[in-house]
Image (spheres, rainbow, N blue to C red):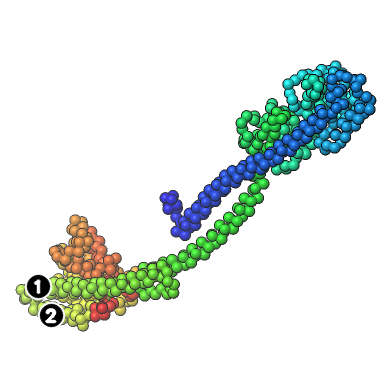
Amino acid sequence: MKWLQKIKLTTIQRMFILLGALMLAIYIVFFAVFSYIYRQNIRHIAVTEMESNLSRIDEYIGLMVRNTDNVSSILMNNEFLQRYLIGNTAMVSTMEFRNFDTLLKNITHSTDFITSIDIYISPHKMLFTSDLGATSRLSEETIDFLDETIASDDVFRISSDYRERVGPFLMRGKNSLTILRPLFSMYTGEKNGLVAINIDVRNFQRILQTIQSSRNIIVDRDGRLMVDSLDGARDNGPVVDNRLVVDIKAGENVMFRRVGNQEYAFLMTEIDIADWLLVSYTSTDMLIQKGMDLQSYLLVLILVLVLFVALTVVMVMRQFSKRVYTLVSMMERVKGGDFDVVIKDGSRDEFSYLFTSFQSMVQHIDALFNEIYCLELMHKDAQLKLLQTQINPHFIYNIFNNMSWLIQMKRIDELDELVDAVGLYYRLSLNDGKLLISVSSVLEKLHSYILIQQIRFRDRIKCEFDVDEDLQEEEILNHLLQPLLENAITHGIEPVSGKHTIKVIGRREVDDMVFTVSDDGRGIPPERLEKIKESFKAEQMQGEFFALCNTNSRIKIYYGSKYGITLKSTFGSGTTVVLRIPGKSQKGKRLPAKGVSDVPVDDCR
């Protein structure tokens, strides 16, 4: 089922597809097995029924033949007939002829299946008939046929062409069979005559028609049709042109043969007295077709069952999906930072256990998160304070260095101005011990710083401030802009001669505050600019790029990794430093771990 996994489907859809495929496979296998078993059962039932039918038909035919034997015995024992056989006509009177003719008529009328009786006396060439009387006017062909029949070794024979061979003058129906028996003289033991008992074919047909479930026929050894249970319907199926087209082999009582596009079941038995074959056959395909109604009902039943199962599965899966989606929605809330999830489920099953375990896990994660969060706050607070302490000594060192230089130059008045400026500067820098300072205070502090530097550089430095009014009340980290201004003087203006300008610009860009410190001094060589950028990535807190790296690190620790400093410089033309931090609208969106002042360390538990 790897192909199913490649398709972008939900688990429920996959389960429905697999269930449908499984039910389809079961349905196909079931009907294949059902059709096979049904076909075998139809064959068995058809053969069993035909065996019973043939047994009864054979019994009826045997009874008919035995009755003809009794009739033949009665006639052979007739005294008149025995005297007439030996050729003594003087011993036979006219009255006896009439009595014998009456006897033949009475025997014929007393038996349902006998239509007429003929007795041929060979010495006198005389033919007695029960329906037309006695006659000696026989053709030579008729006499030859009757004499040949008497001369044969057959004790019993059934003929279907007796009527045609005896002659049309008898005016009898065409559909008849004749049972021929030789007539022996009780005085000499010679065969001097012939008894012919004519039976209407319809009598055989009535026997064959007693069974309606199959077609029954009588054929000779060559397959030629003698009697058919369906009169006038011979040229169809296995019987074509009054002949059975299926090859019937000796010893095969039951056979299955396909004729045309249908399969037939054949059952055969021998009629020994007539050297005939009694064959019964039926179309198994037609029987199976009749059973298709049962299959249709069964199909409807299965479809109803499948529909019921599908409906049950849909209801179960909907309940299953509803509870899964409940769990997924809770996971989405936890993913968004909401750990106050409560799943109310009154069931006592696998899902209730899953809900309870998930809620317990969320509570445990929340506790761990608070613990890690407090540890992170304390770590970042300590790190921030350490960086802050590193900035102050660095600036103090520069101030004392300037004071030493003014003393050496004996510029006492300027030294006095420097001390006043330094006092104002540090009063603003202390900021009552607060970590954040307003932008307006930062600008005032930068003015003091420029005043301190101008004592040393006099009119070589000009500083211009352009900060939007709506930024004045914003609060930022202390000591962010002063190191940038100091770098512009120390590394941009001091190494070159002439007068130079530094610009401090503050603008709001969407939700961020962007401060730019630019100078038109020496600029930074390309290779040195790359080293500075690399030091930003490595967060180096030592070396010649200390002030910039320190400021950049403080911004990222407090505001987040997407904020910080970027440099643009052209060697010989000046440098621009851009500082980006979030404004008021972004402060509420910062992650707690990034804003040390948002949650006091004492609140950690």
Q: Residue furthest bottom?
A: 432
In-image side of 228 versus 141 (left or right): left
In the displayed structure, 312 sits above or below 133; it is: below
Which residue in the protein does label 1 denote?
401
In the displayed structure, 274 sits above or below 384; it is: above
Type of the residue with mark 1: Asn
- Residue found at x 81% / y 22%: 187
- Residue found at x 70% / y 40%: 56
- Mark 2 or mark 1: name the one nearer the start of the chain: 1
How many C-alpha atoms fall within 10 Å of the one at disc 2: few (<14), some, or many (≥20)? some
Residue 149, x across and y down, in percent = 78, 21
Residue 584, x across and y down, in percent = 33, 75
Mark 2 falls on what kind of element? helix
- In three-dimensional space, the C-alpha distance between marks 2 and 1, rounded to whole angstroms, equals 13 Å
Quadrant where the C terminus is found in the figure: bottom left
Which residue in the protein does label 2 denote?
419
In-image side of 434 versus 55 (left or right): left
Type of the residue with mark 2: Val
Quadrant position of residue 96? top right
- Residue found at x 48% / y 67%: 319
290 or 469: nearer the eye?
A: 290
Residue 501, x across and y down, in percent = 22, 68
561 or 490: nearer the eye?
A: 561
